[in-house]
Structures are given as structure tokens and as C-alpha cells.
Image: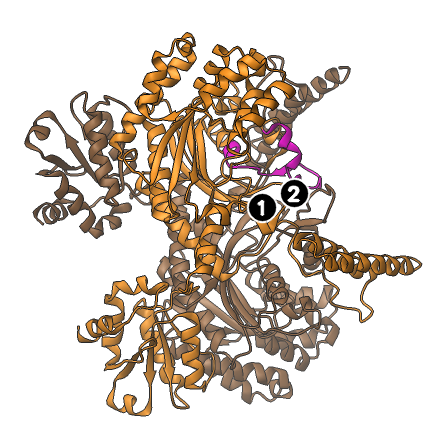
Chain colours: A orange, B brown
Amino acid sequence: MEDKAQIQEAIKSQGEVVRKLKSEKASKDQIDEEVAKLLELKAQLGGDDGKHQFVLKTAKGTRDYNPKQMAIREKVFNTIIGCFKRHGAETIDTPVFELKETLTGKYGEDSKLIYDLKDQGGELLSLRYDLTVPFARYLAMNKITNIKRYHIAKVYRRDNPAMTRGRYREFYQCDFDIAGQYDAMIPDAECLKIVHEILSELDLGDFRIKVNDRRILDGMFAVCGVPDDKFRTICSTVDKLDKMPWEDVKKEMVNEKGLSEEAADQIGEYVSMQGGMDLAERLLQDQKMCQSKLACAGLSDIKLLFSYLQLFQVTDKVRHAVVFDLSLARGLDYYTGIIYEAVLTQAGVAPVTAEAQNGAPGEESVSVGSVAGGGRYDGLVGMFDPKGRKVPCVGVSIGIERVFSIMEQKAEASAEKVRTTEVQVMVASAQKNLLEEKLKLITELWNAGIKAEVMYKKNPKLLSQLQHCEESGIPLVAILGEQELKDGVVKLRVVATREEKVGTHQRLSFCLLSSRSFSFYQVHFPPFSSQLKRITES
Amino acid sequence: MEDKAQIQEAIKSQGEVVRKLKSEKASKDQIDEEVAKLLELKAQLGGDDGKHQFVLKTAKGTRDYNPKQMAIREKVFNTIIGCFKRHGAETIDTPVFELKETLTGKYGEDSKLIYDLKDQGGELLSLRYDLTVPFARYLAMNKITNIKRYHIAKVYRRDNPAMTRGRYREFYQCDFDIAGQYDAMIPDAECLKIVHEILSELDLGDFRIKVNDRRILDGMFAVCGVPDDKFRTICSTVDKLDKMPWEDVKKEMVNEKGLSEEAADQIGEYVSMQGGMDLAERLLQDQKMCQSKLACAGLSDIKLLFSYLQLFQVTDKVRHAVVFDLSLARGLDYYTGIIYEAVLTQAGVAPVTAEAQNGAPGEESVSVGSVAGGGRYDGLVGMFDPKGRKVPCVGVSIGIERVFSIMEQKAEASAEKVRTTEVQVMVASAQKNLLEEKLKLITELWNAGIKAEVMYKKNPKLLSQLQHCEESGIPLVAILGEQELKDGVVKLRVVATREEKVGTHQRLSFCLLSSRSFSFYQVHFPPFSSQLKRITES
């Protein structure tokens, strides 16, 4: 045990570090990290009392979801999945880890962020980094050439977490993709329709969906005189336009990427353009742009896309606009056609959530306010097929962690209580020795499909039973007493208004069951009187 | 590249291995494993054509879920979650990996089956092995002393997979637990009520819920003369009674565990006993059993439990019996009170699924036919609390992978088609050039909340549109034609019966929306005539 003194020394100096950080009011993340180190040292020392020397924390960059967060998460999932199902999507699931080589060579520099499993004998495995590569692997492995599927699951990135800003190492992705050889722009337009429906339904405020096409970008680079081998690097510089002004972007192009000033200026003119179908038409007449067949193909498809979007009724909204924006580039290499990104534009929302962005949505870093992104990637599945057979794909990823943050903030700011259960009625009593009767009644309710609770005590106080209702938002209490039992009835009380009605057991379950609208009371506490009247008079 | 020849040599000999296994008709698992090795070697060799040298497979012991499996999975989850919610449970989620030390010392010998993450700098992490230890960590970390929660998530065990028999390395657990200091046996009884409700609703056939108590087992061992230090090892021998006859169990006790023959015979008498509340009463009068205070406490609680189960209406079922069974031991060390296990008893079901068991349910190995298990564990949370504060818990784990297998087999055996989408109506046309009109109509339907699909082709053949409906079980087609457009109507055809009705756009969406029962047509193909009449006449 000669280490012991050393460890004690280390604990002492680590304690200093923590104290110093606290006195300097360092960030919570930083302090937490150093505290964790301290606790680990203490754990190494072993228990002087011989037990309970655990470091009680979750792994760095991860978190538990508590019931309140889960209730919000469920609500968001239901909205999104409802939309995916409305559009006829199936769902699949893939394992949380893949063969390491399945992920190799798909993420460029970001590969260093992949979590590997320890070599415990057998295959070399890694935790999935996104859902797109496993999807492509699934299609190739099962020789599937047509599918419309969604997949909502957690992915893993050994990124530098900034949990206070909503960046985690374990986070959800929420992907919808259409794979198959189809007529141009029909599935692409449906993806945008879906983004539009989801963002509208989630009620996140005003948003704008920016649309562009990789072929237009590449064609534009060509006609502006960007050398072929600089397309990708110039593209990623353009991608920064939503975070920095044109002057800085131009500087990076010229000074860092070695582009001529003239070429940069020409690009600058194009990437300032925003519009709708009219802009696509104008650019199709543009003398310079016309020189690129690629750009023309892209522009024609943008026109077609907007005509479908019109039929889908998504272009005519003022607060939820779709904009053809030549500055939209998106980081990922694998896009081959249309690309898009949705951003929240409402002043009231953006600043609060500006920092709450994750690696999602999509797979690259996202712009401030971005809540969805995607595009067409016709080559990825072919990378997995032994014969290189291509399966054209277009998809969208909802930035669901971002959405969670916003919804959590909204819930926090609102006076409405988030319910974590859906219990409709509490079975209670004012008097003692009625446990048996309460259990009989709750059995009737459960058997009739009613969501009901009873306290796990023989003789709880009425007050504590009512308090439980108020705390967890249970709207109704069924109260049993000696008198009610004699009369063969149950007293039903509305917790919020304290109104009471009396009815028989059977009528109680019937009323509760037939009143479907109870599920709408999950979050609100409206006056129940009319509701009560209806259910007790039926 | 001097390795190349070596690798080619290895490929050659590995090829021999595979051929030999195939000629010997070895098990598919075995062949697959050797084929995987072969493919890996080939991948090492690198591509002579320079590309597509992936091994296209999922990690050993894992699988993708296809849309059909997902549809079944969703149905099972909905039933189970519905029951948990009916009983007022909240839900939480925890990360897929924990600090390695959080899992250390919780699983005894099985610790070798834990997946560790590679040390990439930072904390040492492991994939969760079950949901109970993370739950206990969560309670202690957040100082929660009262919660009723469910948690459905995947867990990871580096076990020897036998995928043909439903044993995977990545599989779901489905846990419901009640934590808190309450009056005896009320939450325990609710856990059994929940098992009863879920198994009944899932319609898995006859089942039996066996109940016992750790205190009764320990008391019984004491009065039969088992030395204190042999309680646990004799207990795990008793646990084998559902897999082997008493004679063999006795042999193991006497020959391997060194118990006296006399003690073993006394145990043998007790563990053959099965009954209900009457058996508990009889044993409370039993001269020998009475000597153990522990056993008496357990027996009194069994009596109380059965009285609550009677009120919950779960004891009076013939096909779904609850039985006090002194041979039920369950493997886990951490149980401190009541324990239970549900087994399927129907002759028709058991053999088919006998092999389809996983490590779940519960955390130990399970008996043939077991589909749920659990018990009271009052000490586990205290292991995580720095001050050792206890939080009494009782819970149940549904053997959901087992349930999936059974449901998949039932679906396979049945003539009914499993639908993988919920699409209510396909928007189709018999003539060309109607894409615009179809997109307009489907927009109306989507905006009205109807689940609808349209082919992603400008001019698909009517036959291929109808075929898609039949393949994916879409019950209705809305057909547009020149004549219908002139008349301002839509033709609605029932796919199964080919009946047709004509109505306006608006009436179509109204009818489809107001007809809630459409959701029930997900799996079945009933005659739609009456339905159609109702919706078109409204």
C-alpha cells in the first residue's frame, strides 16, 4: 500500500484545482470534469469504511432522461412518427455497434470521433456514428432496391461534449429516407413536405427551408473558374456563410484556399441570390451559368421541385417559407443532387436555442437555428454493394435533440405542468380500513382499461392522496367512504375545482372509458365542470 | 506486400474449413462464423479491383430488425406500455454505456460477459448488462426514494450467441419497478397483476405464475439443516428443478455440494409442494417450518399477497393460475423477499418456443417457457448510496425477446398478412398525365391527417398501383380519371372486394378521417362492403 500516500497527495492537489475553478467561477462542465477526477482518485484510495466508494455519475457526455424529459420526448416522437406513418413509411432497426470496417472510410476526418469497443477476442466493433451508413449497409446486405423507412435511434460520437449547450456524446438521430429509382423530384419534394409538416406541427415558430443542389454548386464553381480539385474545399468554405459574413468567407477562399480574387467575386455574386422558381428560371437564362450542363440539370430540377412543392401547398406560406438559396452548401461529401436545411427564424426562439445544437441534424456541423437537413445521395449504397450497384436515395434528418431542448425550454417557461403519467383517476378514501374496497374498485377500473392509481398504504391520509393528485396532475379522484359503500356508489371529485358527483361503480368505469377526451387533459388543467357533467350524466 | 502470399494461403485453408463444415451439414451458426472469417481474410487481401471488399454482415450475435419484425415489435410494445401506463408508471432512460466501475461487482461470474469500450483516453466504460443496475445507480445518484417506472431498452452480453434459438448479444429488456417504503405486499401484488394483464392481453396461451419468497427458502434451508454458508449454492441447485428431475437435483446437492442425504430429503419434501393461500396457512402450522422466524414472515406475506391477488381478480383463473411453489428459487443473489416467474404451459406453444429463450427475462438463466420474472430487492440501491441508505424495490421483467419470437412464429403460421405500414388509401389513376391532380388530392388527404401514398412515377400502370396495395395491405384506392375530374368526384375502390363508390374530394377526406375504425384494418383483410357503405353514405 505504498501508493496510498501518493494518491492522498494527488487528491489534495486535485482538491486545490477544483477549489480554484470554483472561486474563478469556471464553467460547470469544467468544474464537473475536475470533480469527477477528484472522485475517481478518492475511489482509488478505496474505502476506509470498506464500502460505497463508487463515483456516482453517468459517462462523460451522456445523461439520464428523467420522467419529465421522457414525457416531452414521447410527445415529440409521436408527432414525428405520426407524420412518417402518414406518408407510408416503414421502420427498421439496426444494432448499436457495427463491424469497425463498415464505418471505416465513411466519415473522413471525423473517424477519430468513433467509439471503438475493446478487443475482447472476436470481431473488431465500433458504436454507430450515424444512421445513414448502417442504412446503406442494410440495403446492400439485403439487396433492397426500394424502401421508404424511418429510423429513430441513438448514435455515438467521442466529440468534445458541451452538455450545457446541448452537445452530447450519446444523442438521437431521427432519419427518414426514400430509396429507389423513381421519377425526378417526386420523393425529394415529399421529404420537404414532411419537414414542413413536422416543423409546423411541433409549433416551433417561424422557419425557413433553404434548398439548393450540389450540381448547381459544382456547375457554379466550374463557370466561376474554380479548379476541379478545389470544388470540395471551396464548397465547405461556402458552407460557412450562415455563420460569418461574405468578406470573411472570401478571405478564406483567397488567402487560405488560394482561389483567385476574380473567381471569388463571381461566386460571391451567385451565393447572395435567394428566391423561388423565378430565380431558377432566371439562372437558366444566365449566360455564364448556362455553360454548365450540370448546373442546368440542377436548375431544371429545382424548377420541377418547386412545382411539386406548390401542389403540396408548402410554398405559399409566409411564416414557413421555402427558399432556393445558392449559399446553402452542407458539409457532407456524399450528396449528389438536391440538398436542404430548415432553420428557425423567429427572433424569440433563435437566441435562446442558438447554442443548443448538436452534431445532428444531418451528419455535419449545423448552422445556428438549424432543425432539419438532408438531401439526395445516389452513390452511398453502391459503396457497400459487392458489384457497386447503386440505389438512389433521398432523405431528411430531423434535429431532434435540438427540438427536445426547445420543447424543454418552452415547458420550463410555461405555467403548464408537464405530466409524467397519464393517470385519469386516483382511487382514494377518507376513512380507515378501506384498502380492500379500494383494491376492488381499482381492479374494475384497470380491467376496463382506465388508467388508475391507488396509494400503496393501508390507511393513507386523504390530504396526502389529494396532494399526490395535484403533484402528478391526476384530474379526478374516486372517493370511497362508509356511506358510499352502504349506498353502493362512488364519489367522483374533480381535483382542480373540487366539484363532486356521485355514481355507481359500473357507471364510473363506463363514464371514464367512454370519455375519450381525457387523454387531452394530460398537460392542461382546464375547468372540468362541463366535462364532469357530461360524464356523470351519460 | 510479402504478407499477401500468407493471406492467400490462409484463405485457401479457411476455404477448406468452410467446405468441410458444409459437407458435414454443420449448424448454420457454425458455418456462418467460419464464412465470416473467410470473408475477413479476403478483405485483408484488399481489392484486386480496388473496391467493395466489405464484409457485409452485422456484428456476431446481433441482427437487424426488418419492417415486418418492427411491426410486430411495435404491437407488443404498445400492449406492454399501455399496461404500464394504466398502472401509472413513468419512464426513464439511461445511457447505453456506464462507467465500468458502476457495473463492477454486480454480476458475479457473469461479469466476463460485459462488453468493455476501448480505452481511447478518458473514462473506462462498459455497455450496460441489464437495466436494473443503471436504475439503482439512477435512484442513488438523484436521491430518489419513490418512483414507479418502466424502462424498455437494449442490453449487451458477450454470451455465446445461438441466434437460431433466439439468443442474441444485443437484446431488449423490459422492466417495471416500484421503489419506495410502502405497506407490505401492495406493490408486490400489483407487479403480479401487471404480469397477468400483459400475458393475457398478448394472448400467448395458458400460463402459470409461480410465486415464492427468499425468506421461505432460507428458512426452509435452515430448518432442514443446511449450513448457513451453503444457502446460496443449494438455492441455485433448487433453481434447476424446472429443468431436471428431483433425483438429479438431490444427487447434485449430496455429491457435489456435500449436503447430507437427510437434509436433501427434507428439502425434497418441501420443494414438491404447490398450492395457494391454503398451502401458506398449512406451512405456518408446520412444526419444523415454524422454527424459522424468517420463513414465518415469508409465509405470512404470501398469505397477504394472495389476499390482494384475490381482490385483483388474478387468482380465480383456471388457465392463468397463480401458484405458491416452494421449488421456485431464481438465480440472482440480490432478491430479498417475494420472487416470481411466469411460464407458458400450453402444450402447443411450449415446444415451438422452448429454444427461443434469451438471457432475459430477469437477469439470470431462465427455465423453459419462462416469459416474465422478478421479485423484491431491498438492498441493491443501498450498494450505490454513499451512506448505504436503502430504497426498497420490487419489480418485474417481461421476457420480451421471447414474446417477439412467439409473435413472429404466430404471424408466420397464420394466414394473416403483417402490415408494415398503416396507409389507409392509395391515390392512383388509370390514365396518363394526372400526376398533378394526384399530388393535389394526396395533399388534401395528408393535411386532413389521412395516411396516404402515391407512386413516385409520373405515369404508373393502374395494375402496378393496385399490386402495391395488395402487397402492402392498403385497403382503399382513390382513383382519378378524366371523367372523375370533369365531374369533380373521386372513385373510391375497396381493394379486397373491388367494390367502388364515387364521392367528392372533400367528402373523401371527411369519410376517411371520421372512420376511426380504419386503424383496425392494419392486419386483417375483412370484407369492406359494410364499412364502405357507412363511409360513403355519411
What residue is at 62 percent from the left and 47 percent from the top?
Answer: A162
Is residue B228 visible in the rendered image? The answer is yes
Q: How far is the residue under mark 2 from the one under mark 1? A: 8 Å
Q: Is residue B371 visible?
A: no
Instruction: For label 1, count other residues whose C-alpha is less than 10 Å away and answer few (under 14), some (14-19) or many (20+).
Output: many
Instruction: Classify the position of the C terminus of chain A by image quarter.
Output: bottom left
Instruction: Give the letter of the chain under mark 1.
Output: A
- Whether residue A232 sits left or right of residue B379 in the image: it is left
**Image location of residue B272, percent across then percent down:** 54, 73
**Which amino acid, mark 2?**
Asn
- In the image shown, does B308 or A159 lie closer to the viewer? A159
User: In which quadrant will I find the N terminus of chain A?
Assistant: bottom right
Helix, strand or loop at label 1? It is loop
Q: Which residue is mark 1?
A: A167
**Residue projecting furthest to the left:** B487
Q: Does residue A116 belong to the magenta stretch? A: yes
- Residue B358 vertical placement versus B133 (above, below): above
Q: What's the residue type where badge 1 is placed?
A: Arg
Q: Quadrant of residue B473?
A: top left
Question: Chain under label 2?
Answer: A
Element type at mark 2: loop
User: Magenta region: which residues?
Assistant: A107-134
Residue A460: % across, % down = 45, 85
The residue identified by callout 2 is A160
Q: Residue furthest right?
A: A2
Image-quadrant location for residue B417:
top left
Q: In the rendering, at what x and y percent does residue A473 appear? A: 39, 70
